[in-house]
Amino acid sequence: MRTKGWQNVLTFTLIQHIKTKSFIIGTIVTCVILSAVCVLTNLLPVMLGADEAIDDMVENSGDTYKDFESIYVIDETGLLTDEDFAEANKLGALMSKTDKDADSLVDELSVKETAEALVKLTEIKDTGKIISYSANVYYSEGSNSESANSLSSLVYMLVDKRRMANLGVSEEDYEKTLIDVECTALKAGSQQVDMFTSLINYIVPLILPLILFILIFAYGQTVAQSIATEKTSRVMELLLVSVRPLAIVIGKVLAMGIVSFGQVVLVSTVGAISFAASAPFGILGKMTGILANTDIMNSAGEAAAQAGVSLDEIETAKAIGELFKNFTPLNIILICVIFILGFLFYSLIAALVGASVSRMEDLAMAMQPYSFMGILGMYLAYCPVIFNAESLSSGVVEINPVQMFSYYFPLSSPFALPGAILLGNFNTVQSIIAVVILAAFVVLIAIVVSKVYEAIILHNGNRIKFGDILKMAARK
């Protein structure tokens, strides 16, 4: 049989590659670096005090104006009443009127180390009519802009509420006027999402294809280098004594596939364990608690108040939760199959390239078509997402035609499909169709290899060009 002995080649290549120092050291270093990144992602924000800042923000619930020890008010409008000052004090803002000159008071605040502020309220008129009110907040050296902004919001509420009350609007009706109206331009057939989900929809298709490209393309090049090295060092001649040429390429591709897939699983497992182990002690521990709280997920506003978290954190948790919902057994299997098929697709081409050279010096030139194919596939998977950046601001998921093409085109589908599956942009039927198309092209490449490999592996002399290989396959 033409493939007899491929098992021996697989075993030999696998053992030879695994026991090399470069592979062992590279795997260890990669695991250590990934573990460090995962741990630092959780712990570094805590070490830098980011968790304290979040706790302070949650504790104050936006009412950082309470940090002011004294708040002086110069009301040139006469709008605010004693009732408004009493309400402010009840809310924790120690506001009081002052007869001091505004300029001199501002000068005093510029050098004070205590947390104090001045609110100057004035009218803006046009043709004798009030068209708006202006409130300037000056804060001392011992305070900060966050507290001043919080105080500005409080002053706006007091002024607006008093203005509506003077017009005869009751407190109950005033609360109704505070209801926001959110308008979104949504293209028919598109899916509206929140900002955090939109960010994930934008980032995942950028990061995941890059990772898969590095893995598939790098391991494919290793196949070409392995075959070219053994051919130029005469090891191939010894192998051909006991096994057929086609068995060599099958054994080497499968061996490198096992090595690559095993290394990816090992590194990913180490990273996942490091991430999970450090999460409870890091900044993401809080997010994990939010995800576990079903009440928060179902009733964001009320549960946020009860749990002491912000609505932004809730939306972030929802977005992450939606992403993890797509980690179903079927999707994981599909992604693994896509990775394997993508590796076989590029590795079989790389094997032909490696067999076409007689000198290692020619390998770089011979790999140019292979590199162009990989870059083209990466471009189709990567760039359409960049050019679709308007979805980031509009909050609308919209797959453009080039993206859809990249999901089915075999050069780009190994890089683009996993992200589409994880984000739910592709349903099960579409994913299976794309996988079948990729598998069909892998079979096609395997047929080409079976026709021409035996001829080119025995070739010695000038490098066989990629076009010549295709012509040889057409003749056979």
Image (cartoon, grey):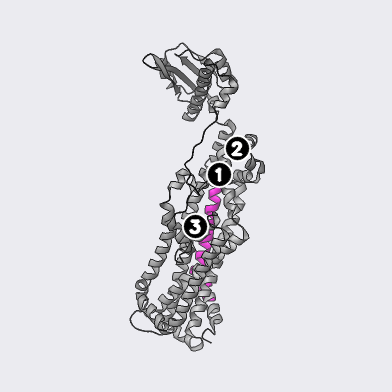
Q: Amino acid at mark 1?
A: Thr
Q: Residue at x 44, y 18 (%)?
A: 120
Q: Amino acid at mark 2?
A: Val
Query: Which of the two discs, 1 and 3, labels the residue nearer the N terminus?
Result: 3
Q: Secondary structure at mark 3?
A: helix
**Rendering coords of residue 280 (x, y %):** 62, 47
Decide if residue 392 is on the left or right side of residue 55: left
Q: Circle 1: is it few (<14), some (14-19), or many (20+) Cα within 10 Å? A: many
**Residue 208, labelled with which disc?**
3
438 or 415: nearer the viewer: 438
- Above/below status of 186 relative to 28: above
Query: In the rendered image, which residue does mark 2 sit on?
Result: 309
- Above/below status of 24 relative to 47: below
Query: In the rendered image, which residue does mark 1 sit on?
Result: 316
Q: Is residue 42 magenta?
A: yes
Is residue 91 visible in the rendered image? The answer is no
Q: Circle 3: is it few (<14), some (14-19), or many (20+) Cα within 10 Å? A: some
Q: Quadrant of residue 102?
A: top left
Q: CA gap, disc 1 to disc 3? A: 20 Å
* SS majority, magenta: helix
**Rendering coords of residue 425 (x, y %):** 53, 55
User: Where the C terminus falls, by quadrant?
Assistant: bottom left
50 or 227: nearer the viewer: 227
Between marks 1 and 2 in the image, the one whose residue lies nearer the viewer? 1
Which residues, given as a range, are shown in magenta? 15-43
Query: Which of the two discs, 1 and 2, labels the residue nearer the N terminus?
Result: 2
Q: Amino acid at mark 3?
A: Leu
The answer to the question of whether label 3 and label 2 lie on touching residues, with beta carbons closer than 8 A, is no
**Rendering coords of residue 65 (x, y %):** 53, 25
Q: Quadrant of residue 461?
A: bottom left
Is residue 14 visible in the rendered image? The answer is yes
75 or 419: nearer the viewer: 419
